[in-house]
Amino acid sequence: MRFLLLALALTTLHAEKASKPFLSSDRRAFTAPELLDAPDEWIIRSFAWADDMFNTYPPAVPEHPARRAALIRLDDVLHITSAPQKPLVHKFFHEQVTRGIEDLERTKLTAGARIWKIYSHSWIVRTPSVTIAFDLVPGPPRNDAFALPATLLERIVRQADVLFISHLHSDHANKVVAKMFLEQGKPVVAPEGLWKDDAYFASRLTYPERSADKVHSLAKPSLKYVAYPGHQGKGPINNNHLVITPENFAVMQTGDESSDDNDWSDFAWINNVGFQHTVDVLLPNCWTTDIKRMARGVNPKLILTGHENEMGHTVDHREDYTQTYNHLFGSPYPFIVMSWGEGYTVR
């Protein structure tokens, strides 16, 4: 019955696309259609207004309506087909992340945690004793003009103690960033086989056993972690890293976890995460298979979504903030949607 309903839904969407020429793809059926281009004045004013709203109404539960409106306006700008090549977009990205780095550099904690969204699914998590980086990359792959300069990346790496990489895709794994960590004597924890053909990395990366039942330890920095054995569909292995700090703060980042629609095997362990560990914050990719089911399995105290507006993706796969709200509508778990460079303090 479930597959019949899915087939009927897809048939309806295809019919809608045929009758609604403003749709570029079925995936865009429930979000505002994109433009091929837009005037610079509109982009500048949109960014300025969004920035003002983010400063006035920072990430919070509950969320102020003006903040959500600003995120949706960012969707409008970032879904212009030519957005990844626009210098105005690059400038906004660099400015927002620079502000986040400045906040990171001056943040000292005596309790709780602060979490920054750097780009797409790149995160920095700080507690009083440790600072953790997840899937840190300069920006969208193969777009040097968009990417953060080395000087900014170095500032982030100096603040962090360890890097966790979920899987091999270049919007999650970057050799330049990983080398910065290794050259500072900081561990890089990666999925089995990542860059094994490169002798420099093969001899230096930490490849943990992928197991839902194995708790690993690092001595420096002092922390424990689980490398849950995830996948991206039928594609690459994808470690879902659950990291537990000395303060017993637990954060789980899922990389590109997305069991294939006809293969629900990863839910066998996802369904039990919340029974095994008390998870404070879940950092899922916003388009994962059945995000509400994932949340029920992990049972986090808070969800911070990632992977919106990955600018290396084509428009039809450039997941937007609007769809994140749609996916989590009615969720009993509190969640926050964040833009580039923003931070949130967990008490």
Image (spheres, helix red, strand yellow):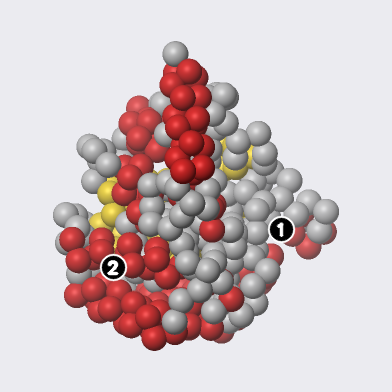
Q: Is residue 153 visible?
A: no
Q: How many marks?
A: 2
Apparent side of residue 45 relative to residue 141 in the rendered image (left or right): left
**Residue at 57% across, 24% down:** 263
Other residues around mark 1 within 10 Å, as few (<14) / some (14–19) / many (≥20): some
Mark 2 is on which residue type? Ala
**Residue at 54% across, 29% down:** 261
Which one is in front in this view, the residue at disc 1 or the one at disc 2?
2
Apparent side of residue 17 relative to residue 166 in the rendered image (left or right): left
Q: Is residue 260 visible?
A: yes
Give the residue pinned by disc 1.
204
Quadrant where the image shows the N terminus: top left
Give the residue pinned by disc 2.
70
Tell whether label 2 touches label 1 (CB within 8 Å).
Answer: no
Apparent side of residue 134 relative to residue 175 in the rendered image (left or right): left
**Can you tell which quarter of the image residue 51 is in?**
bottom left
Other residues around mark 2 within 10 Å, as few (<14) / some (14–19) / many (≥20): many
Estimate the spatial distance between the alpha carbons at disc 1 and disc 2, rounded to whole Å. 43 Å
Residue 169, given in percent of the width and then of the height, sits at 65, 53
Apparent side of residue 318 relative to residue 301 in the rendered image (left or right): right
Q: Secondary structure at mark 2?
A: helix
Towards the viewer: 236 or 54: 54
Identify the disc placed on residue 309.
none
Q: Secondary structure at mark 1?
A: loop
Residue 53, given in percent of the width and then of the height, sits at 23, 73
**Residue at 62% across, 69% down:** 177
Residue 62, given in percent of the width and then of the height, sits at 16, 54
